[in-house]
Amino acid sequence: MKFFTDIFGWKFQEFPGAEYWIAMTGDEKSPGINGAVMKRNNPQQPIVNSIEVESRDSTFDKIVRLGGQVVVSKTIIPGMGWYGFFKDPDGNIHGLWEKSPGVK
């Protein structure tokens, strides 16, 4: 959780007595995913979600600095934006998405 707090500013709320948290990723102005986080029981079970960022390059720099690994770097979707994938310190793969200027 520290990894995601340091990179994206997410906050986590733990449910007492369980290894289960809610990731609070948004607010009234910018809704987030606000999803469940729990220990992975099956190491072969991948998860992949995409996180929109303002700068994929600077976010990848922070990810690597804080113990993550880039697994797919800068890939363009013409007229839409760029994506890439990273592995967090627990081995989960996540996507990053940066919109092209002017794309809503």
Image (cartoon, rainbow, N blue to C red):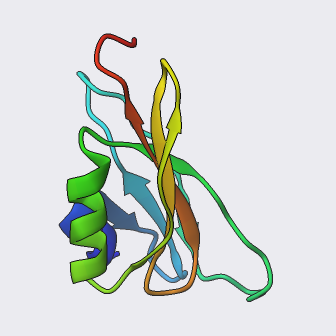
Q: Along the line of sight, which residue is nearer the eye, 47 or 60? A: 60
The residue under the point 80% across, 84% down is 44
Q: Along the line of sight, which residue is nearer the eye, 26 or 53? A: 53
Q: Is residue 5 visible?
A: no
Q: Is residue 37 above or below residue 27?
A: below
The residue under the point 24% across, 44% down is 55
Residue 89 on image: x %, y %: 43, 86
The reply, left or right, for residue 38 in relation to residue 7 is right
The residue under the point 36% across, 24% down is 100
Q: Along the line of sight, which residue is nearer the eye, 73 or 35? A: 73
Q: Quadrant of the C terminus?
A: top left
Residue 66 on image: x %, y %: 24, 82
Residue 92 on image: x %, y %: 58, 75
Q: Quadrant of residue 58?
A: bottom left
Residue 4 on image: x %, y %: 32, 67
Q: Quadrant of the N terminus?
A: bottom left
Q: Is residue 45 above or below residue 10?
A: below
The reply, left or right, for residue 63 in relation to residue 48 is left
The residue under the point 31% across, 49% down is 56
Q: Along the line of sight, which residue is nearer the eye, 102 or 91? A: 102
